[in-house]
Structure formats: C-alpha cells, structure tokens
Image (spheres, helix red, strand yellow):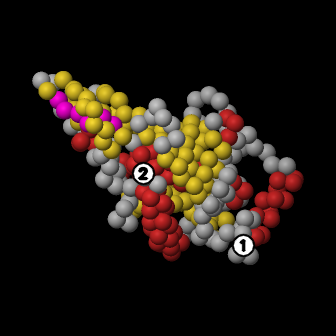
Amino acid sequence: MSTTRQLSPVAKLEQKTVVDLILKGKRIDDRGANDYRPTTITLGIIDKANGSAQVHLGKTKVVAGVKVEKGTPFPDTPDDGILTVNSEFVPLASPTFESGPPDENSIELARVVDRGIRESKAIDLKKLCIESGKKVFMVFVDIYVLDHDGNLIDAAAMAALGALVNAKMHDFDVKNGELRLKDAIIPLPLQNYPVSITTTKIDSTTVIDPCLEEEQVMACRLTVTTDKDDNVCAMQKGGLGVFTPDEIKQIVSTSIGKARDIRAKILASVK
C-alpha cells in the first residue's frame, strides 16, 4: 500500500539503511528473503458474525468478519449466491489513513482478496441458491485493518479465508417458494482455500512479506494467489518497477510453497 507523506532527512536515512541491508542479503528484522514474520491466526473472535478471524502478521493486524443474508441474485447468474468483499482502513491504524470513503488502496485490497476467493471458486455459490432467479444467500466479507506495518494484502487474505472457514449458517429448505431455516448449523459451502503471497523487489533483490519500511523503498510488488491444488488463480502487480520473466517464475514457485504452509496453519485453527 502506498503512502504520500513527505519524508524527513531521518526517514530518508532509515530507508537507505533498509536498502543497504537488502543488498547485503540481510533484512532489518533479521529474516531471510523468503521468511514470513511471526504469524498468529485466531478464528471466531466476533460473536455476532457468521464467521470471523484475526491475523497478526508481525505488527500488522487485520480482522475479517463474514455475514450471510438473503438477497436477490444477479440476472446473469440466477442460480448463484453472491459474494461481496469490502475493506476499511481504520484511521488509528496508520498516520497515512484518513476517515471518509475508501481510497484506491482500500479498494485495491478488497479487489485482490475478492479475486482470489472468486477465481479459486472457494465458495460453492450454487449451494447458496434458495430459489432460482428470485432468492439467494449473499456472503459479505468485511476486512478491517487495525494496525499497518506492511503487507496488508497477505494479512487481509489470511483473515478473509480464516473467517470463511470459520463461518456457519443455518441449514435450510424451500417449500412452496418459502425459505425455512432449520435448527441445524452447517459450515459455509467451501470447496477451495486460496492464499496470497506478496513479494517485493528492492533494488535488484526480491523478498517476501515486506514490512512497512521495506514497502517504502520497494520498486514493485507481485501478489500471487494459489489454490489448494497449487494452481495460480490470481496475480496483482503494484509499483512502477519491473520483474524479469525468471524472477516471476521464481516468485510463483516460492509462493506455492509458502501458501501451502499458511493454508495448513489456517485450516489447523478450525475447531
């Protein structure tokens, strides 16, 4: 995520230190190039939501909640439920965040998370159809950035997936066109588990899971989202720099392996 603040001489010196360390094969927090910061994923933290999750990725903190409601299907997909992803940057999370309508960074974050869920077909939307062309269930995924210390995309994607695997809804049937909710509680109909891995390029070196200081000096970033079968289902580039074809191949390969670890961690949190 970008920032438009003017940098002080001290901040510029700090950024030079970050770049100098990267060029020496080091990082300011002593991680390796392909190491994630300590990650904690907690599911079911919001009682009133159908599903929820909180992710700590280093000092970055993101919460996601899922709500399931009745609605009307889109005309071109009359037999499919609806997925909507929104994100909000809480002003207290960073000096660069402001109150008001979502800015381009917030919109991009929601779209990247949405694309990973949608393109992997994580939710079986056809199982959310109540009555073709008339009634379906709508799944709302709301993401809240509470502390910003870099790599919001991966943290948000983890939180969204955690909230989805935690989500429950009432079983239902339809009789004479009327929806009847049963007492039984069932999981949201999930069939895939997309995970996003973000790599940044600083000078000529690539590192994953950039902290905020690293994002401030990056030339560009590439987010690769893969599904449970290691298929790439979404990619998003940011920044003005470029990646070579060989760098992209290596990034994809590394992303697949890292996504497996994160996916296993999220699924292991399910009770």
Residue 224, numbered circle: none
For residue 164, say whether it is visible.
yes
Q: Residue beneath label 2, please?
A: 271
Q: Is residue 172 shown in magenta?
A: yes
Label 2 neighbour load within 10 Å: few <14, some 14-19, many 20+: few
At a point 63% along the width and 36% down the height, the residue shown is: 90
Q: Could you tell me which secondary element the residue under label 1 belongs to?
A: loop
Residues rendered magenta in the picture? 169-174
Please, what is the three-letter code of the amino acid marked with disc 2? Lys
Upstream in the sequence, badge 1 or badge 2? 1
Label 1 neighbour load within 10 Å: few <14, some 14-19, many 20+: some
Distance of label 1 from label 2 (alpha carbons): 38 Å
Q: Could you tell me which secondary element the residue under label 2 belongs to?
A: loop
Left or right placement of residue 231 versus residue 209 in this view: left
Left or right placement of residue 67 versus residue 149 in this view: left
- Tell me the chief SS of the magenta region: strand
For residue 78, say whether it is visible.
no
Q: Position of residue 88 (x, y in %)?
A: 56, 36
Picture layout, residue 138 above or below residue 164 = above
Q: Position of residue 236 (x, y in %)?
A: 49, 55
Q: How many marks?
A: 2
Q: Residue beneath label 1, please?
A: 26
- The part of the image, by quadrant, that contains residue 102 is top right
At a point 60% along the width and 64% down the height, the residue shown is: 36
- The part of the image, by quadrant, that contains residue 210 is bottom right
